[in-house]
Amino acid sequence: MMISRCPPPAGPLAATIRTAAAIRVMICGLLACLALPLAATAQHREPDSVIALWPDGAVPGSQTLDGRLEEVIVERSEDPGTIRDRYVAGITRPRLLVFRPETPNGTALLMLPGGGYQRVVLDKEGIESAERFNAAGITVFILIYRLPAEGHENGADVPLQDTQRAMRLIRAMAEDYDIDPGRTGVIGFSAGGHLAGSIATRFDAEVYPAHDSADTLGARPDFAALIYPVTRMEGPAIHEGSRDRLIGAYPAPEMVAVHDIAAAARADAPPLFLLHAADDTSVPVANSLDVFDAFTAQGVPVDMHVFSEGGHGFGIRYTEGLPVAVWPDLVIGWMEGGGFLPEMPD
C-alpha cells in the first residue's frame, strides 16, 4: 500500500479557464498529486484538467478545520504499474476531474464514485468508467467530494453541497466543454449512488449560500443512474457503515426521511436508471427494488436491471465473463432512448 499526501497548492494555480458565466473557476495544480509513482506505466490516463469547486477559503462547512484534516491518496494495488486501485480521503479541496472524449456529443455526466462515505474510490468507479463513457462521446466529470464524518460542519449535507455545486459549475462551463446544459446527468456507485439519489431528490435544497453566478443555475440532473446504490437509511437493507457516517447510528426520524432515497421519492425527480446484482451481500438489492417501487408510484420513469451475479463494487474490472458486464452499454442505451444522447447511426 502506498500513500500520497497532497499538500495545499502553493502559489498561483496552474491556469484558469473562461466560463460562459464569467465565474471564477480555476484549474487546480493537482495533477501531480493524482499521479502516484508508478501511475505513468499503468493503462489508464490521468484527467485532462482538474477544476476546483469552490473559491479559495470559501468551502462551506470546512473553514473551521484549520488544517486538521490532511488529504491522502492511498494505492491499494500490489501492482499499480499494471492496474491501479486508489482512493482519496481527508478531502478538504473538493474538485472535478475532467475526462474529455475525442469527439464530444454534447452530453455531460457527473460521476460519483463510492467508498461507503469513508473514502472516494478513484480508479475502479472513477477513471475506468469515465474512459468507457468517453468512448461513447460523453464528457465525464468525476467528483472528488468531501466526506460527512471527517469533521466538517453539517457533515450530512457536505457531500450534497459539493454535488449541487458541481452540477451548477458543469452547466456554467457548458460552452467551454461543448456540452448541452440540458443533457447533463449524474451516475453514482454504491455510496456515490446514494449521493446521486440525493441530488435527484434534494436538487432544490438550500444547503449552502450562493457564491457566484454559477449558483443561480439549476442543480437538478436531467437523468440519474444509480449503480448498486446505497439508498435505505432504515430497515433490514441498510448499509450500516454508510448510514452511520452520513447521519449517525441512531438518526432521528426526520433525518431518515430526508436521506432515505426511497422515502424521499418525489414526482419531479429526473428519470432514473437502477442496476444491482441479486447476490450483493454488502448493499442488498432491496436498496434498488425499494427505490423502483417508490419512484414508480410517483410517476417517475424508472428503468431497472437486476443480475443474478456480480456481488458489490464490480465497476467494470470485475465483470469479465458475467452477464453484468453489459451494464455500461445498458446505461448508454437508456440515455439514448431517453433523448439524452444523439441517436447512434445504424
Image: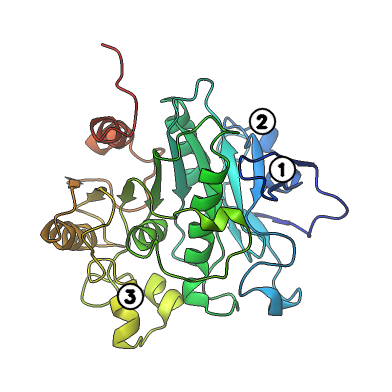
Q: Nearer the viewer, mark 2 or mark 3?
A: 3
Nearest the viewer among 299 and 91 is: 299
Tell me the quarter of the image containing the C terminus: top left
Element on which disc 2 rests: helix
Q: In terms of depth relative to the viewer, which is nearer, 114 or 265?
A: 265
Q: Residue furthest top?
A: 346
x, y (%) of residue 217?
Answer: 49, 53
131 is higher (above) or lower (below) than 227: above
Classify mark 1: helix, strand or loop.
Answer: helix
Query: Toward which corner of the image does residue 208 lie, by quadrant?
Result: bottom right
Q: Can you identify the residue that label 2 sits on?
A: 41
Distance between the Cα atoms at labels 3 and 1?
Answer: 36 Å
Looking at the image, residue 83 sits to the left or right of residue 308; the answer is right
Q: Residues within 10 Å of mark 3 (few under 14, many from 20)?
A: some
The residue wearing badge 3 is 258
The residue sitting at 51% across, 44% down in the picture is 171
The type of residue carrying mark 2 is Thr
Amino acid residing under circle 3: Val
Give percent across and percent down for residue 7. 78, 59
Determine if residue 113 is in view: yes
Q: Are circles 2 and 3 on residues that touch, CB within 8 Å?
A: no
Q: Quadrant of residue 260?
A: bottom left
Q: Amino acid at mark 1?
A: Leu
Q: Residue at x 62, y 55 (%)?
A: 53
Residue 300 in the image, given as x and y percentages of width and height: 18, 53
Q: Which residue is mark 1?
A: 31
Give the class, few, some or many, for how many residues have Cα within 10 Å of label 1's Cα (few <14, many ≥20). Answer: some
* Mark toward the viewer: 2 or 1: 1
Cα–Cα gap, marks 2 and 1: 16 Å
Residues at discs 2 and 1 in contact (Cβ within 8 Å): no
2 or 3: tag closer to the N-terminus: 2
- Using a 10 Å C-alpha cutoff, classify the residue at mark 2 as few (fewer than 14 neighbours), some (14 to 19) or many (20 or more): few
